[in-house]
Image (cartoon, grey):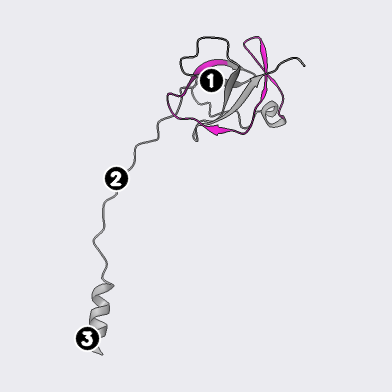
């Protein structure tokens, strides 16, 4: 009986503490033109699903928000307090722009060009 207690005591011994290194802060997925901005999540026009005027054109929400990685989009224009991005390297008028919704999560809401019916 004593051997079982001693064996259990050995298993339950506390391991030496391992020093954890602090992780560096996460790098933002895109640059924002105005420091301190974190995305459009709280903008009322975004919450209400209103169209967005961007670069003289009107864009409407298209699908669900998506996560885009660094280098996939670049800043295009600011409008109504939000920051819009386009695919990196796009040289013509965009048909789809991406509204930065959440900088920490690299979340963007696609908007497509509104066409007259």
Indicate which disc residue 3 carries. 3
Helix, strand or loop at mark 3: helix
Residues in magenta?
49-77
Is-magenta flag for residue 38? no
Q: Quadrant location of the C terminus?
A: top right
- The reply, left or right, for residue 44 in relation to residue 27 is right
Answer whether labels 1 and 3 touch (C-beta < 8 Å): no
For label 3, count other residues whose C-alpha is less than 10 Å away and answer few (under 14), some (14-19) or many (20+): few
Q: Nearer the viewer, residue 95 or 54?
A: 95
Work out how far the residue at label 2 is from the one at label 3, CA to CA, in angstroms.
39 Å
- The reply, left or right, for residue 107 in relation to residue 43 is left
Disc 1 versus disc 2: nearer the observer:
1
Task: Say which label, 1 or 2, has the lower sequence index.
Answer: 2
For label 1, count other residues whose C-alpha is less than 10 Å away and answer few (under 14), some (14-19) or many (20+): many
Q: Is residue 15 above or below residue 32?
A: below
Disc 2 versus disc 3: nearer the observer:
3
Q: Position of residue 34 (x, y in %)?
A: 51, 20
Q: Position of residue 105 (x, y in %)?
A: 50, 35
Disc 1 versus disc 3: nearer the observer:
1
- The residue to which callout 2 is attached is 21
- The residue to which callout 1 is attached is 85
What residue appears at the point 22 percent right and 86 percent down from the top-left corner?
3
Work out how far the residue at label 1 is from the one at label 3, CA to CA, in angstroms.
68 Å
Work out how far the residue at label 1 is from the one at label 2, CA to CA, in angstroms.
35 Å
- The reply, left or right, for residue 90 in relation to residue 96 is left
Q: Quadrant location of the N terminus?
A: bottom left
Q: Is residue 104 above or below residue 34?
A: below
Q: Position of residue 77 (x, y in %)?
A: 56, 14
Helix, strand or loop at mark 2: loop
């Amino acid at each position: 009986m004593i051997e079982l207690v001693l064996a259990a005591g050995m298993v339950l011994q506390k391991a030496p503490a391992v020093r954890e290194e602090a992780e560096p802060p996460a790098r933002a997925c895109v640059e924002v033109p105005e420091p301190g901005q974190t995305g459009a999540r709280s903008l009322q026009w975004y919450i209400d699903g209103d169209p967005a005027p961007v670069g003289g054109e009107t864009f409407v929400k298209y699908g669900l928000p998506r996560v885009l990685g660094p280098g996939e989009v670049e800043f295009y224009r600011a409008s109504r307090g939000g920051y819009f991005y386009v695919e990196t390297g796009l040289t013509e008028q965009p048909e789809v722009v991406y509204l930065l919704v959440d900088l920490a999560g690299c979340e963007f809401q696609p908007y497509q060009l509104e066409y007259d019916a």
